[in-house]
């Protein structure tokens, strides 16, 4: 079938089809459409045909566009968060507002303006977070079809730099909205201690979706790089016993501690543990937590549980018996926090249903 792509008279049709597919991918917000489109793009870019280089160039352009969007949205979110934190600190230093006079119309108009500004700010946050969520989803789908990391850049460090930037953005969100149990009620809306200033569930729901897609993207890349490392080092053999009793590669020992797969795995574990730190202790008071706080904590812990399960499957403790030092280093032998965090959340939801 790909041999048809090599026909000179089909070149315009091929390029037009490829352009349409990449445009559809950048415009679509439906995961099923993204997966179908990604499979089509993968089919056009694979195989030994005359248009393969042009197809790969188009995929590289698509990946670069998604990367730039992610970086822009993450940077915008970081700038907004820094500005909010600075404004909050400054407002706490100010003296209390004077009591306004009923006849003071200028103060009334100012309050209306402030309310409108807050609504505009919340709307901008939702728009930016939604755009970031969708582009992380697009990147994650491409990553699962092995069309993301290898097209990012010829330099592997720049690709890892993007994943670290994404991980920093996720860590910032998890830390910013973590509920401080020691905080008093008056400060519960302050940035950095789990406050959602809006009662609308859309913002925490979309932000939790950003965390989920970011975790899944890093997991997909980690999985792909792990498979590539196994192929390069020839760690997979037909007889499983040989993988445990084969000859050890002395040169491999030098790069194990700083291997890219190990760095990504450790970063993922840290983020999953942060997800489980959002746990809300069980209380008899039904109004102890805001609905937006409860929603946020539930969603990120569910995402953390999914990724924790995948990590323990991908890097089982049995790898600690392998001859390869890389496999031994990647084995997750201390998984008590990964298991315990999700068990604690699961039991809390079970107890909640019993009370109802």
Image (cartoon, rainbow, N blue to C red):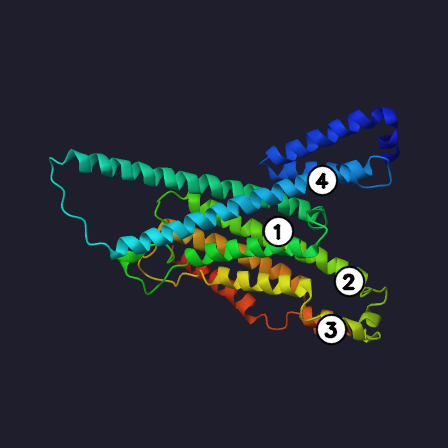
Q: CA distance from mark 3 to mark 2?
A: 16 Å
Disc marking residue 245: none
Residue 313 shows in this picture: yes
Element on which disc 4 rests: helix
x%, y% of residue 352? Answer: 41, 58
Q: Is residue 146 above or below residue 332?
A: above
Q: Is residue 89 above or below residue 3?
A: below
Question: At 70% from the left edge and 74% from the top edge, which residue is drawn?
Answer: 320
Q: CA distance from mark 4 to mark 3?
A: 35 Å
- Residue pointed to by mark 2: 230
Q: Name the N-terminal-most of marks 3 and 2.
A: 2
- Residue pointed to by mark 1: 217
Q: Is residue 40 above or below residue 80?
A: above
Question: At 68% from the left edge and 62% from the top edge, which residue is drawn?
Answer: 261
- Residue pointed to by mark 4: 59
Q: Name the N-terminal-most of marks 1 and 4.
A: 4
Q: CA distance from mark 2 to mark 4?
A: 25 Å
In the rendered image, the quadrant that contains the N terminus is top right
Name the side, left or right, on which 103 lies relative to 168. Answer: left
Q: Name the N-terminal-most of marks 2 and 1.
A: 1
Residue 193 image-quadrant placement:
bottom left
Q: Name the N-terminal-most of marks 2 and 4.
A: 4
Q: CA distance from mark 1 to mark 3?
A: 28 Å
- Residue pointed to by mark 3: 254
Query: Dot 3, crowdedness within 10 Å: few (<14), some or many (≥20)?
Result: few
């Amino acid at each position: 079938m790909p041999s048809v792509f090599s026909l000179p008279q089909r070149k315009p049709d091929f390029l037009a089809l490829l352009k349409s597919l990449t445009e559809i991918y950048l415009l679509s917000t439906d995961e099923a459409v993204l997966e179908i489109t990604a499979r089509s793009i993968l089919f056009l870019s694979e195989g030994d045909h005359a248009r393969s280089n042009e197809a790969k160039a188009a995929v590289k352009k698509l990946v670069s566009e998604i990367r730039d969007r992610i970086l822009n949205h993450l940077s915008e979110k970081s700038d907004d968060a820094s500005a909010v934190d600075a404004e909050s600190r400054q407002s706490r230093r100010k003296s209390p507002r004077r009591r306004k006079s009923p006849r003071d119309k200028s103060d009334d108009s100012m309050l209306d303006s402030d309310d409108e500004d807050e609504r505009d700010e919340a709307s901008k946050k939702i728009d930016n977070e939604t755009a970031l969520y969708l582009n992380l989803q697009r990147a994650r789908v491409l990553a699962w079809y092995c069309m993301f990391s290898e097209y990012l850049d010829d330099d592997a460090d720049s690709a890892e730099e993007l994943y670290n930037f994404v991980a920093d953005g996720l860590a910032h969100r998890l830390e910013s909205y973590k509920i401080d149990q020691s905080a008093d009620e008056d400060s519960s809306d302050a940035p950095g201690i789990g406050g959602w200033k809006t009662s609308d569930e859309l913002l925490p729901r979309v932000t939790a979706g950003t965390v989920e897609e970011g975790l899944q993207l890093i997991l997909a890349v980690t999985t792909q790089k792990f498979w590539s490392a196994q192929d390069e080092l020839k760690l997979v053999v037909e007889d499983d016993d040989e993988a445990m009793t084969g000859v050890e590669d002395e040169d491999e020992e030098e790069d194990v501690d700083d291997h890219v797969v190990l760095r990504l795995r450790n970063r993922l574990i840290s983020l999953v543990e942060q997800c489980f730190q959002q746990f809300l202790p069980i209380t008899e008071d039904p109004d102890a937590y805001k609905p937006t706080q409860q929603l946020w904590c539930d969603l990120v812990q569910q995402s953390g549980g999914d990724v924790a399960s995948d990590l323990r499957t991908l890097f089982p403790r049995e790898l600690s018996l392998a001859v390869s030092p890389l496999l031994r280093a990647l084995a997750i032998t201390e998984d008590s926090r990964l298991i315990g965090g999700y068990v604690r959340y699961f039991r809390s939801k079970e107890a909640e249903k019993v009370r109802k």
